[in-house]
Amino acid sequence: MSEDFRTAAHRAADLVSDYLAAVPAAPVWQPMPTAAREALLTLPLPTEGTPLPELLATVEQQILTAPMGNGHPRFFGWVNSAPAPAGVLATLAAAAMNPSSAGGDHADVHLERATVRWIAELVGFPATAPAGGILTSGTSMATILCVAAARHRAAARLGHDLRADGLAGLPPFTAYATAETHSCVRKAVELLGLGSRHLRTVATTPDGLLDPAALAEAVAADRAAGLHPFLVVASAGTVGTGAVDAFDPLADLCAAEGLWLHVDGAYGAFGVLDEAVAEQYAGMDRADSLALDPHKWLGVPVDCGCALVRDAAALRAAFSLVPSYLRDESADGFGWFSEYGMEQTRPFRALKVWATIAHRGRAGIAADIATCTALARRLGELVQAEPALELLAPVRTSIVAFRVRAESETAAAAAAADALNRALPATVQQRGNVFVTGAVYEGKELLRACLLNAATTEQDLKLLVTEVLAAADDLRGRRVES
């Protein structure tokens, strides 16, 4: 390796260290200046190569100066975490090795199997054979894998060879979820040829959880109509409010009806590590599959999701295709990871997951998560203490759903409040002091603050409330002036 690389690598380490150290004192996010945006959009393809020092200068001057903002302790938007330092370092080492983690006898393959087991152990899911799992790009891909396994099992139980014959000749398969279920579930259903019309929206209980009684009625009605129920999707932390469904009654129903129970735990499954909220996760370990994202609450650098399954053979049955040049020579018969999903060439995701978990340990991760949930409850209290704001759902994990109240109970005031709350996130973001995003819950526009950064303080929460109120006043003023 040339000295040029060694020198540039040291410089890159300094750049990254300086960037991370400066994040808390910088604006959370600011729109890129037009000229800076255009400079990136119109970059010419170079004819000659660019020396490493010049490449780093471009990174320093044009890339690190315009971050998304998610590394900042006052970033409360979407479910995007700050990167764990150990994961950042491990990403460099993984890129230097640059293997394909499809299979074979090399470190990344064995580390992935151990890391998947660690993830299962952290969230209390079955962690030893026949259970298993695979790292993916994110929960969207993990969901596709799990739904495909459920679809394959359902077809096999009907005596149908799905891989050979496709869906032709099968009755319509129906799946069940609530309106708060992540959109990746609908994408998976559509992509796998099941049709979004057959993804039933099940009613929720008064506290926003999937209603087992309503689910049972929907399943019975579909069976009576000649359809084939096969899948129930529950949530361990919904996108809008962080709600966690009651898993035990859902698992009971699925067992009785022969349905596959899948849990979307993309963001919230790791909340089970906080003793203060762990009770609401009872029964999550009874699911047939669980999809989650180490790149969310654990802070593993993007990308990294994980599909966990109670029976790894279900994934292998749905995806295994072994050409002659990939024959399995492994001693334990596990085969290649490429038999358990869609990817053949797979990146070395496991190293950054291993490093992140190993650096903090179970106790450190649990403490970080408990800090975030406690901060969320505190933010809920601050919202409730402010007459101009209202909390729209109980704070169950680390998402706080709130909004600016309507000024009266008239229909016109309700419409104005919805318009105001719809405009608030962008207005708050552009002020640069905090970052919050919006959503719709039960037909109402809201702000949703997601707390994933254990470095966030109560002062940051107070500033969030202050900024929301100031932005609301600003928007009202603009409307009066107009």
Image: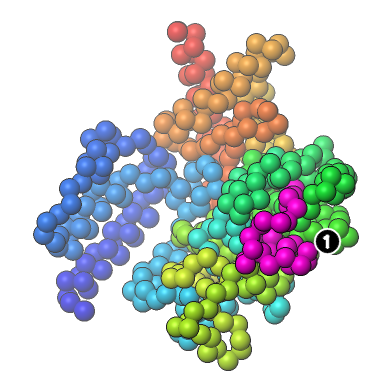
Q: Is residue 172 magenta?
A: yes
Left or right: where does residue 133 sit relative to residue 463? right
Crowding around mark 1 (Cα neighbors within 10 Å: few <14, some 14 to 19, many 20+) is some
The residue sitting at 27% across, 39% down in the picture is: 37
Left or right: where does residue 109 sit relative to residue 292? left
Q: Is residue 119 magenta?
A: no
Whether residue 276 can be seen here:
no
Q: Which residues are magenta?
A: 148-176
Residue sitting at the far bottom: 331
Among the 4 quarters of the image, the one containing residue 180: top right
In the displayed structure, would residue 240 be above or below residue 419?
Answer: below
Residue 114: give x, y in percent of width and height: 58, 78
The residue sitting at 51% across, 25% down in the picture is: 423
Residue 373: give x, y in percent of width and height: 65, 50
In the displayed structure, would residue 428 be above or below residue 178?
Answer: above
Residue under pointer 1: 258
Q: Nearer the viewer, residue 285 or 47?
A: 47
> Total number of numbered labels?
1
Q: Nearer the viewer, residue 345 or 180?
A: 345
Residue 250: give x, y in percent of width and height: 82, 54
Among the 4 quarters of the image, the one containing residue 421: top right
Residue 291: give x, y in percent of width and height: 63, 60
Left or right: where does residue 313 sit relative to residue 116? right
Residue sitting at the far top: 481
The residue sitting at 71% across, 72% down in the picture is: 311
The residue sitting at 79% across, 59% down in the picture is: 259
Q: Secondary structure at mark 1?
A: loop
Task: Name which residue type carries label 1.
Answer: Gly
